[in-house]
Amino acid sequence: MYLLVVAASVNEHDMLKTLVEAIPKILNWIIAFKGSQDSKVPVVDFGSDYGLRNLKISEVIDIEEMAWAPKYGLKGIIDASIRVKVESSGNEANEKILPLEFKTGKVPNGQSSLEHCAQVILYTLLMSERYLRHIDSGILHYLYSDQTQGIMVRRSDVVGLIMRRNELASDILKASKMQQLPPMLRSPSMCRNCHHLAVCTIYHKVHGGSTESSGLGDVFDSHVYHLTAAHCAFLQQWDRLIDLEAKETQLVRSEIWHSNAMKSDRSTNCLSSIVLDASNGFSQQKSLKDNRFIYRFVPRILLPHNVYASKGDSLDAPSPPVNDLDCTLKIGDYVILSTESGHQTVASGVIADIGQFHVSVSLSKRLRLPSSNSLPEANDLLQEVWRIDKDETMTSFSVMRSNLVQLFLQNAQSSHLRNIIVDLEPPRFDSGCVFSQDPAISYIWSVKSLNGDQRRAILKILTAKDYALILGMPGTGKTSTMVYAVKALLMRCASILLTSYTNSAVDNLLIKLKAQGIDFLRIGRHEAVHEEVRANCFSAMDVQSVEEIRLRFNQVKVVAVTCLGITSPLLANKKFDVCIMDEAGQITLPISLGPLMFASKFVLVGDHYQLPPLVQSTEARENGMGISLFCRLSEAHPQAISALQSQYRMCQGIMELSNALIYGDRLRCGSPEIANRKLKFSRLKSCSSWLNEVLNPHKPIVFINTDMLPAHESKDSKTVNNPVEAYIIAEVAKELIKCGIESEDIGIITPYNSQANLIRTAVCIISVEINTIDKYQGRDKDCILVSFVRSSENPRNYSSSLLGDWHRINVALTRAKKKLILVGSCKTLSNVPLLKLLIDKVNEQSGILNVSHEDIKLEEHNVEQVGCC
């Protein structure tokens, strides 16, 4: 509760006073309308057409009920959903379900305002969709004046509201598709005190508006005079890119509302055909700390399945169920829970836990089906088949737009960032610093564990007046470098904002800071934060007052939050000396802007040679949305970059491959021990000569060429996989384990989700991590196996496919410490220029291994070229 008070920026005593006044009034109203059998039934006025009605509440069904109406494109939170008995003058009693809306004020001019009545009518539309019955009325109660008004839904009112809704939808469509905004109101008296005046005038100017067309005269000019043509072009371009990306996401999201969504492409942002886990009887866990309910779901049918059914014995281990929960959902994601049968959206929640065969969802209230009539209701919940979809709107394109337009406001911070980011003014560095008198710089020179690159990077940060860019190449210890940078900045008593796009990236840095004894405050949802740093969240603290929260904020110098979490009201009006953004190369420019608004200078840490920002829209990506702020500033001002080049991950042979393809020989091994790393086997003798060659510890890179096998890709309109490559990967993985390599030290990577699924079925060893390239960013293993998948009789140019993305190839090649095993068709992959160079470089190391029928007798294992289930 205290967090909400701080977030709302209200006085604790004022809030308490409001509650003390309001709660008795609500209680008295409930007592009056729910009273005993003998008590007098209250009368409610439903207007001139419907008159006075006796009304008695028989049940409060729900409070603050979230309701969706896809048909109308509306959603809302209803104060209370109630079941009532209504008696007309003819003593006819009807039972109804109604929305109840409380207003803290009094009835304006003795009658309910049109705005309030319209709100209740819209709630009846939402409830009609949710409860699958016609809701024809609602209740409006004003607490201050203790007046209750009945609202009857008239067709003319609904038609009027729908028409206004359509007008708004049309304006939004024109704005998103044609960049055409509706005209300004041209009313100085109305606009002058509007909270949106600054944003409205900026957009009007950017889209070709003038002082005359605005109708606001000097008021308009005073808000936009600072904008140049370049500023307007920048805002218009990025606004258009956000529209394109939002449209693409909306196409995915619209599937949630259509009955054929279950038959759609196997989206990794959703889970379908799941049921509540009834293995120990139906129950929900309740978290007493945050008063939330946790429900566990499992796949509806768990059938053992083996893609590679052998003629005699099956493969070494039983296959896992085919319908495991393979998806991109992760702990902390906002999700929507709906039924598959009626396709009814039931609740919104947060992923609390997820595994291969289960997912737990945290809800703010008990799960219930609005249309359920059975008692106990648990029967209906257990019989229902559910679907979980990622709530894409929670990633909030509105945050992108808000960040973007803030860049063009007329204030000192916005002007400073605008000069740097839009006008690309060169960054300034302090060259006159007296090093001997700066304890931070003296400290950095004294730390023996830092190498030259790391020390220079931290000095770059300390001398920056505007910003610094740290290029953290693979395995170069950028996280450790940032820890020492934070320690040095704290010696200057600097306040620091740490951020990144993902919770995991933020928490990885915090875990290392905690090990160094550095105090920090983590802003974020309890479910999304790593357990090792949850104690530094307000949700884990025993705060007893608003003053304690403010005191904690004043005590701590380091605050950490995700780029989207920066919108937390807890951070309103906070200012920091430095913002450090990790994984900046993977964050879109509009998202990056948010945290930068809070700091005097910033540090971007990343590697734009690895994965760029994830952009779903092809058109948006081709027009520049995939260019991060890190990349934009790096290309404009290379002098702002400090590169970390000494790497402590890859052995010499693997590093040379990445150097030749991507980094232009800039990477170097941090020590001879790193350069000479090799896999250590407890035994090394296989019955297959080709496996002996693959596992040769003196060959750090082996490319298994499948051109002499019938190893062609299998694909349909939605997926592509390669069963033969999956079989080869499985055989190599199992042989590695037989020879003494721990399964936890083996990683398997592929560009395609469907191939990852196929390999999981073939390998059957849960502790071997199998994932797509995108999910392996920032990870490493002693031995990495890569399945390239694409292989055909008449290979075409795959440059436009995932294999043509050099960022992804770079990530795949730089995950291995000691051994890199690649599986693919040299003939097919040579059609991609970068992969042809890869094959040539591996060949220079004598790492190409051509396998044939003599080596791998596929027919003995009945390896069929079938798609992934």
Image (spheres, rainbow, N blue to C red):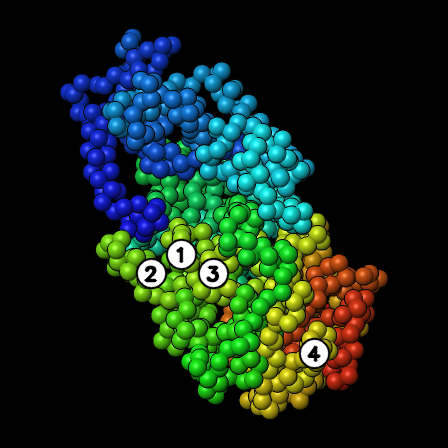
385 vs 429: above or below: above
- Evaluate whether residue 796 shows in this view: yes
Give the spatial CA distance, label 4 vs label 1: 43 Å
Q: Amino acid under label 4?
A: Asn
Q: Which residue is mark 2?
A: 553
Kindly check if marks 4 and 1 are in contact, taking CB atoms under 8 A apart as contact: no
Looking at marks 3 and 4 on the same chain, the residue that comes earlier in the sequence is marked by 3
Give the x, y percent position of residue 561.
44, 60
Which quadrant of the rendered structure holds the C terminus?
A: bottom right
Give the x, y percent position of residue 484.
46, 77
Kindly check if marks 2 and 1 are in contact, taking CB atoms under 8 A apart as contact: yes
Q: What label sits on residue 599 in the rendered view?
A: 3
Give the spatial CA distance, label 3 vs label 2: 16 Å
Q: What label sits on residue 659 in the rendered view?
A: 4
Looking at marks 4 and 2 on the same chain, the residue that comes earlier in the sequence is marked by 2
Q: Residue at x 45, y 30 (%)?
A: 126
Give the spatial CA distance, label 3 vs label 4: 36 Å
Number of the front mark, 4 or 1? 1
Q: Which residue is mark 1?
A: 574
Q: Secondary structure at mark 2?
A: helix
Looking at marks 3 and 1 on the same chain, the residue that comes earlier in the sequence is marked by 1
Q: Amino acid under label 3?
A: Ala
Q: Residue at x 51, y 84 (%)?
A: 450
Give the spatial CA distance, label 2 vs label 1: 10 Å
Q: Amino acid under label 1?
A: Lys
Q: Secondary structure at mark 4?
A: helix
Left or right position of 453 against 300: right
State the residue lying farthest toward the right.
794
Give the spatial CA distance, label 4 vs label 2: 45 Å
Give the x, y percent position of residue 184.
58, 30
